[in-house]
Image (cartoon, rainbow, N blue to C red):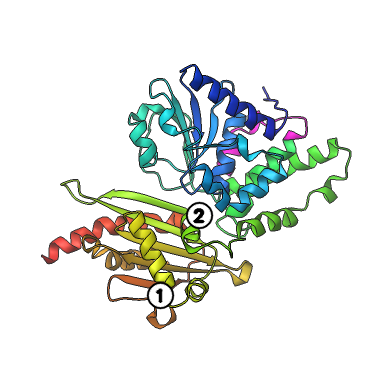
Amino acid sequence: MSIIRTSLGQFLHSSRQSLLSSLGASKPVNIVIGNQSADIDSFASSIIYAYYSPDPSPVPFLSIPRADLALRPEILHLCSLFSISPSDLLFTDDPPIASLPVSGTTLTIVDHNRLESDIRSHFPDDSTVRAVIDHHDDEGFYLSASPRIIEKSGSCTSLIANHFKSSFPTEGPVRGDLARLTLAAVLIDTTNMTNKVTQHDERALKFLEVQIQKSASEDGGDAPEKWDRKAFFDGVWGAKNNVDKLPLRDLLRKDWKEWVEIVDETGEEQKVGIASIPRELNWLKERERGDGFIDGVKAWAEERELDVACIMTTTGRGGEFRRELLVWELTNRANGCISAFTEKAKEAGLGLGEWQNGSLDVGSERRAWTQADLTASRKQVAPLLRESVRAGVGKNLSQV
C-alpha cells in the first residue's frame, strides 16, 4: 500500500514532535541516521528512508551538531526549495544522542554501514541496528539487519528509492518533492549522471523523473517544460560549492570523515581523517598566504587528535574536472603510512602524480599529488588509506 504524506515539511515537523514526545515519556524510539559528513546523500537518504517506512516510521537524524548546518549551504538550499524548516531537523546534539534510551531504541543506518564511534559508545549492542542501506565497502557488521543492502552505486539514495519503489506516493504534490529531493543526491553524487553512474542510479533516475512529470501534470502544468534536470542540478551544485567565504577550519570540517583503526594485536589505535574540499590545493595555499594553509591543517589535525590527515580536492565539471590529494603523517607511530598508501594507490590505479614539483612535500611524512583517476572519490580512497595505516605499522615493526 502506498504511504501518503502531506508534505516533506509537515512530515519532518511531526517526526520531531513525535520524538520529543517519546523522550518526554521515556519511551524507546526508532531513528535513521546518515554518516558524519552529513552531505546531501546522507541528508536525503535519512529523510526518504524514514518517509517510505511504514508506521511506526523512524525519525531522521543528521550526524552533526546543529551549529554545523551553517556549513552546508546545499542543505539549506534544499530546505528552502521544499519548505522544510531547519528548526524541524534533528541533530546529534538536538536532542543529544545520549538522551535517547538505550533499551528498546532501534537504529537504521544509511550512507554508511558501521555506526560511528560516538554513537556506537552509546549504543554498544550491535542488535540495536535493525536496517542498513549503503553504497560503501562492506565492513561486515550487523549481519542480521533487515534490510541489509550494501551495493556499489553512485548515490545511496538510488538504492533506497529502488528498494521502496512500491511504497512511493501515487498522488499529491509531495510525490514530486520526494522525487526531486532524491534526485538532488543522485545528481550531485554522479555529477549529473556523468561520473560513477551504476545501473542502480539509472533505474532510480528513470523512475523518479517519471514521478516528477506525473506530479507536474497533476498540477495542471506542461511537465516537459516544468522539469529541467540541468537547471535543478546547477542550482544544487552552485549552493554546494558556495564556500569561498568559509574559514579554513570550516572548509576542513564541512565535509569531514574520520576513523579509528586498530593497528596491531595489542589493540593500539590510530586515528585517520579525510576532508573533501571543492577547491584546488593551490587556491587554498594562496588564499591562506605563507604557511597559513599548512598551519591551519596541522591545527585542525591536532584538534581532532589525528595520526594521519588527508585532504581530497575537487574542481571543475565535465572535461575540466580535477582531483588532488594530500596525505600527512602527523605522529611518529604513523610512519610508514604514506609509503604503504603509495603502493596501494599504484595497485588501485589512482594515477598519482607529483603536485607542483613537490612544493607541499616534506620528506616521507607529507606528500601531495594530482590524481589521474577522476572516478576515485573518498569512497574509494578512504579504504586504501585506512589499510595503509595498518600496513604502515607492520613496516615500522619490520624495520626495528
* x, y percent for residue 206: 69, 45
* x, y percent for residue 368: 39, 72
* x, y percent for residue 212: 75, 42
Q: What's the CA distance linking mark 1 and mark 2?
A: 21 Å
Residue 170 is inside the magenta segment: yes
Q: Earlier in the sequence, mark 1 or mark 2?
A: 2
Inspect this view and state whether residue 198 appears.
no
Q: Which residue is mark 1?
A: 291
Query: Residue at position x 47%, y 37% from top?
Result: 93
Q: Which residues are magenta?
A: 157-174
Q: Which residue occupies the extreme bottom position in the image?
A: 357
Looking at the image, is mark 1 or mark 2 nearer the viewer?
1
Kind of residue at badge 2: Lys
Residue 299 is inside the magenta segment: no
Query: Residue at position x 67%, y 46% from top?
Result: 78
Kind of residue at badge 1: Asp
Packing grade of label 2 (10 A; few <14, some 14-19, many >=20) is many
Which of the labelled discs sits on residue 254, or is there none?
Answer: 2
